[in-house]
Image (spheres, grey):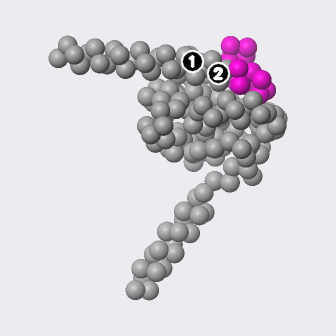
Amino acid sequence: MKTYNLLAFALIFICVVQAVDWESRGLNPNVNWLTYQEATEKAKENGKHTMVLFTKPWCGACKTLKKALVQSKKFEEACQQFNVVNVEEDSENPKDNKFSPDGAYIPRVFFVSSDGVVETDIYNQRGSDKHKYYYSNDVDLVQRMKGAKIEMDYRVKNRASVDEGDRSEL
């Protein structure tokens, strides 16, 4: 019996230790931040697209962007339409090279459609050709979030209708 109690305690301890303290990362506490794995699972349940924000704790540009996002009500509102992810630690990085098509600089933002496609052609159109996924302020990011949602809604719908058409030919 003592072994089971010790095992139960160990599992609870591991779960508590692994929980992410989003606010200590300097992120907006009014946004429902998720890990990439959680967002992938949620997208299957809620049908929302995912926005992935890559940052590092030592990065000055990341701190500036996060500070702007904490103060932005429009960002909070836009986030309600997405599963929102922050990847800060190397151990959290999705094992997918699609998140660094033009390098692994930070901060960078990617959009993943609800059907799991990393939409690498959705990027900061006001940004640099060398750093397409870099956003320096909340205004540009919120504007892109709104456009990305519309584009991804359209794409997912079209991919689904193509898939249905393929099945009807069988």
Tell me the residue at 61%/37% (across/down).
84
Alpha-carbon span between mark 2 and mark 1: 7 Å
What's the magenta region? 124-143
Q: How many marks?
A: 2
In the rendered image, the vertical position of residue 15 relative to residue 137, given as above or below: below
Query: Taken as a whole, is the magenta stretch helix, strand or loop?
Result: loop
Query: What kind of element bears circle 1?
Result: helix
- Residue in front for this viewpoint, 77 or 34: 77
Coordinates of residue 132 in the picture (x, y in percent): 66, 19
Query: In the image as oriented, which residue stretches furthest toward the bottom?
Result: 2
Q: Is residue 163 left or right of residue 36?
A: left
140 part of magenta stretch: yes
**What percent of the width, then of the height, locates residue 70?**
78, 39
Q: Is residue 30 one of those drawn in magenta?
A: no
Instruction: Kindly identify which residue carries mark 2.
Output: 146
Q: State whether residue 74 is above or below residue 6.
A: above
Q: Nearer the viewer, residue 140 or 154?
A: 154
In this figure, which residue is indicated by the disc labeled 1?
Answer: 150
Asked if the residues shown at circle 2 and circle 1 are in contact, with their CB atoms under 8 angstroms apart, the answer is yes
Q: Residues within 10 Å of mark 2 (few under 14, many from 20)?
A: few
Left/right of residue 56 with respect to residue 122 in the rendered view: right
